Amino acid sequence: MLIRSLWAPALLCALLAACGGPKTDAPATKAEADAASPKAAQAEPSPTAAPVAAVDGARIIAANEEPGAWLAHGRTYSEQRFSPLSRITSDNVDELGLTWAYKLDYDRATEATPIVVDGVMYVTGPYSVVSALNPVTGTELWKYDPKVALTKAREGCCGPANRGVAVWKGKVYVGIYDGRLAALDAKTGKVVWEVNTIVDENRSYTITGAPRVVKDMVIIGNGGAELGVRGYITAYDTETGAQKWRFFTVPGNPENPPENKAMELALPTWTGKWWEFGGGGTVWDAMAYDPELDLFYIGVGNGSTWNRAVRSPEGGDNLFVSSIVALKPDTGEYVWHYQTTPGDNWDYTATQHMVLAELQIDGKPRKVLMQAPKNGFFYVLDRETGELLSAEKFAPANWASHVDMETGRPVETENADWSKEGKLVSPGPLGAHNWMPMSFNPQTGLVYIPMQEAIAYLAPAPDEQYAGKGTWHLGAQPLALPENKKEFDGAVAAHRGHLIAWDPVAQKEVWRQSHVTVWNGGTLSTAGNLVFQGTADGRFVAYTADKGEKLWESPANSGVMAGPITYEIDGEQYVTVAAGWGGGFPLALGGLSLAAKVQPDSRILTYKLGGTAKLPPPKPGLIEQPAPPKVTGTEAQIAAGRDLYNSHCGMCHGPNAIGSSMVPDLRYMTAETHAMFPGILAGARAQQGMPPMMDVLKPEDVQAIHQYLIKRANDLHEGLKAAAKAPEGEGG
Ligand code: CA
């Protein structure tokens, strides 16, 4: 039962992955020259005749002929995130050192993979800000800020993240958090064209993923399935921004005719009035392309609501939720699909990074697609036909016993269905693997997965109705964390993260390295027999690819989540990672993430052999707690405040008011903040990112929430006083 109380709410929050929560924002840290990085004016790449961002399909297909560049999101269309570069090896990696650092504007979810081509690095930060940098020095060449309203963070699940740009024929493409897609001039950062990708402005759509470019089309999806949307992806002409095609992933209201044959196929797999909640199926991250087969693959997200008994009460697989779908890139026409989680009930997105490779299976070379989605199974598919070749658990999973190879379907256990009665489910909605990209090394034959154990308690809220934009719709009860220290510590200990090396042919783990908690970074593997990964506890680490021996690490001043890259210029190999903390775990699980013991501090970090740059000191932790006001609310008012807080505030400020370092911990409010509390909820701090909430709260609700927070501030105050006498604090 221990986990019950704590995770009941926790699990919700656990949803993280693509989920969304109201997010508020701490004041932005404006970019300033980073003391660490030598930003003195240096010779920049000549702006004359040299080609800039001269990427096209032929060049990406031939990426191995110029291994010094990182041309596309996963380096190649196959998205292996393997580099043939080998100047940095397991023999000399101990000489690796920081050579420059570039400070980003916002210390929020930092998730980008940079592109490096023709002597320029293009990278994004939170709120979709794009920077072009000199990859040798870190000097800024230009910056484009799309000026997303900071309060827009409330309309996504997991912070104003951006996972990177695409580059094509002199332009840089960025999907913007508020739903715009922009094409920038690669030389200047000026907008060439911009389109709004959102089909329904009354729903909470966001963009956090990196676009992909195929055949002169830039393709982008969106997020929002925690807040009630219908998923789709759209292809636009790279030159003009004209729409070429759109593929919806789930059917709309059946009063309207299905858009195409795929929607005719999907419609009978739904029941009830799913369209009121949107149905979900957002394509918020993974895409891949096979130029020989001319197939474009998309990973489709969870159902909306999570609770299938609310979303589709008479059952059904709910195509194409939690599926991998192959499309013809010229038209967006459906070719095949494989559904990893029929009738998704757990936020088991299939949006996790997909890798294309050739594997020897039963003695024959097979063109495969590999994915390790949230649900805990590692899938190997024939990417020409969608045939399931194998599926085995790469992480603990109690929702299904195995995947039946006859039917290709998971066999659910008694533990799977929480629609009527709450259950402790693993993986929880954080997933056994989230968006942090894995990598495949063709030399070792291994896949390097940022795997995690994050169980969650899911309990139904069966009467949920769609309540409008900016509101979560899960059909599940809101999160809470245990207020009691012992249970809280149990929840912290139950979140475990690992880097695992997985043999996709034998379907078994070959080695692992364990971390202090979940939410560790994506991976890069190289021909130097190396795997690079950042960690939640603020380190950037190198391991041998074959055996997993730790060889080197460097402090990152912040939790690291993004996938690293490597490139080579003038005979020098560099390794870059976007360091910065945020996203679903610290936002929604608040204090659990403090086990990582880092503050968010976002920078692009670049290393080379013999690098000698130094980071500034890490940001200080929490300041001293101001003395809280006296509790004046009644027990009933405080109890009501607790429920209201967890429903409307906890997804950002932390369940039960145990905050993370991402947005203010409200137990630390000053007397001035207490005095203006109702005004803040009415929008007084919108400029700093705190969204107005009076569309969903009444004045008496605000009072109840305030009284609950005063109570929690006093709980902490008492706890800290006690801790000052004995070791250990925090928790209650
Ligand atoms: Ca989700």
Image (cartoon, rainbow, N blue to C red):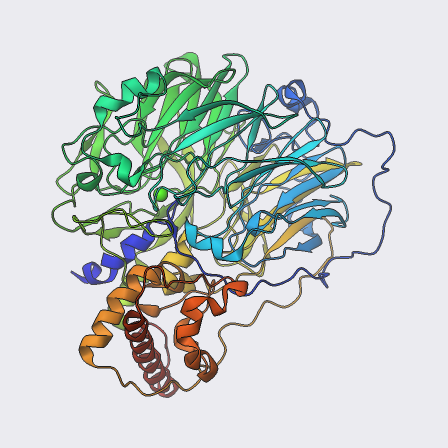
Q: Quadrant of ligand 1?
A: top left
Residue at point 72%, 41% (across, down)? 190
Would residue 359 be seen by someone viewing this image from the given angle?
A: no
Q: Position of residue 325 (x, y in %)?
A: 39, 23
Tell me residue 320's x, y (percent).
32, 27
Taking the image as shown, residue 721 lies to the left or right of residue 315, namely right
Q: Residue 223 in the image: x percent, y percent?
A: 42, 41
Query: How many numbered marks are there?
Result: 0
Q: Determine which quarter of the picture holds residue 214.
A: top right
Residue positioned 38% across, 52% down in the render: 470
Q: Is residue 684 above or below residue 410?
A: below
With respect to residue 272, does 436 lie above or below?
below
Query: Between 560 and 285, which is closer to the camera in this rendering?
Result: 285
Any part of residue 731 in sight: yes
Q: Which one is in front, 721 or 395? A: 721
With 590 as the anchor, is 481 left or right in this view? left
Image x and y of residue 60, in percent? 64, 23
- The quadrant of the image that shows the C terminus is bottom left
In the picture, the quarter occupied by the N terminus is: bottom left
Residue visible at 45% across and 84% down?
A: 671
